[in-house]
Amino acid sequence: MKVAENKIAQWFLIGLFLFSPFLLNAKMSSGNYQIFADGFMDVGGSDMNSANYMMVGGGGEVGMGLSDSANFSLRAGTPAIDREPAIGISLSSDSLDLGVLSSSSTSSVSNSLQVFSNSHGGYVLKVYGQTLTSGANTIDEIGAVAQASSSGTEQFGINLVANTIPLIGGAPVLREAVLDADYGTINQFAFTDADTVATAAKASTDSFTVSYIANIAGGTASGLYQTTVTFTLTSNF
Amino acid sequence: MKTKIYVLLLSLLFSVFPFGGEAAYLTQVSDQVSRHAPSTASDHLITFTTPSGVHVPGRTMVVNFPATFNKSTVNYTDIDFSHGPVTGYETVETLAAAPGVGVWGVSWSANDLIFTSPTDSAVNEISPNDKVKIIIGLNAVGGDAQIINAASTGSYPVEIDGSFGDRWFFALAVTNDQVNVDANIGVDVIAPTVQVLSPNGGEVWYTDTVYNITWNASDDVALDPNPIYLYYSINNGSSWNLIASNLANSGTYAWTLPNINSQYVKVRVSAQDSSANLGSDESDNFLTIRPRQNNGTTSPLWPDGEALAYMEEQLRLPLLDGSGWAYPGDLIKTPEFTTVYLFGYDGMRHFFPNEKTFKTWYYDFSKVKIVSLDELVKLRLGKNVVARAGVALMKSETSNHVFAVAFKGVLHRIVAEEASKKLYGPDWNKKVKDIPDVFWGDYKVAPKELDGEAYPLITLISSFSSNYVDSWVASVKTPYPLGTVFKYPNKSEVYLLTVEGKRHFANEYAFYDNEYYWSSVLEISEEYQYPDGSKINFREDDLNNPYYESGRK
């Protein structure tokens, strides 16, 4: 009986080490890395990447991820966050020229946009700005609901995919990101202030081509039209 | 016994590794910013969910901003603070610089933005699992100040912690976040296309003579009715002088050359379109402009005006590669021999005795033109070129006597080493060039020797040239011969000592145009003062043409 009791105690202790996520409320660091959050119990997890990537595995961890109740919240294990939180956004150019607009054809131009977040909560990419404006004159923005390009109709819009009409843009390279339908449909364009153009539910690095199109009507006032488009990245840590 | 040991270990384990719940992690932590751009003001909306909440007075929530973000103008009036179970905006707290009854304190401590709970806080001041919203900047009610992003791009971690017990992190990105998009409807923003055809570099033109400037100009829409503006520069484009304006786009303009002398001339043609866009082109390389007039002096070998042009047309030699012509005044040689000649206006070729003599005139051989031997021998041999005045000291190969060189190959012996040091500095010997004895006869040795003392200038020149007659030369004393290029200590002006007095080089282009080099400039004592002569603004053939110095003029 004593032998049985000992074995029970042994297995309980081993089990405790294996399955209890120790919350050591401290940073761990070396010369090359820093782990902001605790949790070193990752047995047989997946996605154990190189020094340049994140460890997002956690197999073997009981209740990995968020554990919420009315009275407590727990972030268990390494996957919560395994290094300094980081986000980034990069635009390939800060000025674009749609050239001379015509009521008989669509003007288009594009640049590339890269987004990065190592947060397990992912990110939200939004676009801000007004439509093309020349003094008191404007070219109608397409709005939040995507439309096809239509020559002879005032339109200013963007999307993030490879289009054929007009022939502009490239296919996005997505790891976790999901394009908003209004900005992620081929040959469909949208634009309105503070719209979400892409989201990611996990840590991700994604590359997009942002295509800008403009159409004018026969009566659109002449002039030099300009606008500034701003992209913001908000990540959920 | 073993059981007791395991129980003991188990107790120890629990005491060393406390389980979660004592200090919880914030969840759903984010900061929505209005701008990512470096050194740019940005609004912030910081959101998080606190598992623990706040239940007693004096508890702090701290947002640790990066030190490189400028927070100096932001205070509690630029911040909104709210919380609630669903949106986070259900309860909006009153803020002040310090906590009070029903009032949260908001303060900065270095980079820490500290929220301190009210002095009368009770349980569920902030309920567990409430969402918390912190608005910083212009979106806060009454907010008029913003946090300025760091100047350097990158990702900046931010920590939220404090005595309320919960903590977590988020990151701020600083990077270029904007694209300026331009478009044009019916407005011409494209400048005209212009190409200068002539002069496009390499030409030698003469003053007071008419030459055609030619160009092509066009526009994608329409040029202005009189769209052409012509300019020239003598300083490689640092400044431009108007030749003519509002010309028709005829493609040619007859330019009567001004009285300048420079080998660094460029011509610019500008064209304006109907939308006032201006397009321009310039000569690809330098045009040389030389004077027709002989500065008032007369010589049967130096004809003026059209006679000179006619003479040059008659005397010119075709270049070996067929690319153009060698004219009087040019340096020429043949492929067969290394000998370099000066093509004289007398139609003769003048021999440079050696490289040392050549380099008193020219920095290198880049201006030498190649002609065929058959063409070269059409020119009779003239007198040899002598060393340039003021540039070097000379001695023969068989004598230790050292001579200073004045204009026209006149030599003044320097009587002693002490005098050489006094006049030309401790490294005077480095200026000494040997002249083979066979060429010594090309020079004239003046009776007046230099001993370091100042003499009336006229004593240095009067015995050699009746041309050098000027009232001032009798009264001015100098230990240096004419032709000396000099400056005074700690002064930038460079002068040439001539019969006019000291002539100031107006700028470095005038200096280079006349083939002088900084190593030629002698720094002399301010005790030697000379009257001001005319400024040297351009190339002057009297100064830079070995032909004159060889006594041909």
Image (cartoon, coloured by chain):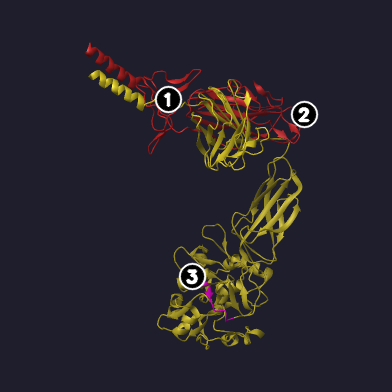
Chain colours: A red, B yellow
Residue type at mark 1: give it.
Answer: Pro
Q: Which mark is residue B359?
A: 3
Q: Amino acid at mark 3?
A: Lys
Q: Is B80 placed above or below B190 here? A: above
The answer for which chain carries disc 1 is A
Foreground label between 2 and 3: 2
* Marks 3,1: beta carbons within 8 A: no
Which chain is disc 2 placed on? Answer: A
- Taking the magenta stretch, the answer to whether it contains residue A206 is no
The residues bearing labels 2 and 3 have C-alpha atoms spaced at a distance of 72 Å
At label 3, counting other C-alpha atoms closer than 10 Å, the crowd grade (few under 14, some 14-19, many 20 or more) is some
- What residue appears at the point 66 percent right and 85 percent down from the top-left corner? B471
Image location (x, y in percent) of residue B303: 65, 73
Label 3: chain letter: B
Residue A88 appears anywhere in the view:
no
Q: Is residue B120 left or right of residue B296?
A: left
- Residue A47 versus residue B243: which sits nearer the camera? A47
Point out which mark residue B26 bears: none
Instruction: Pick the residue in front: A64 or A49.
Output: A64
Q: Position of residue B50 (x, y in %)?
A: 52, 25
Left or right of residue A169: residue A42: left
Q: x and y percent of residue B4 in the render?
A: 26, 20
Q: Which residues are magenta?
A: B519-528
Residue B416 found in image quarter: bottom left
Dot 1 corresponds to which residue? A79
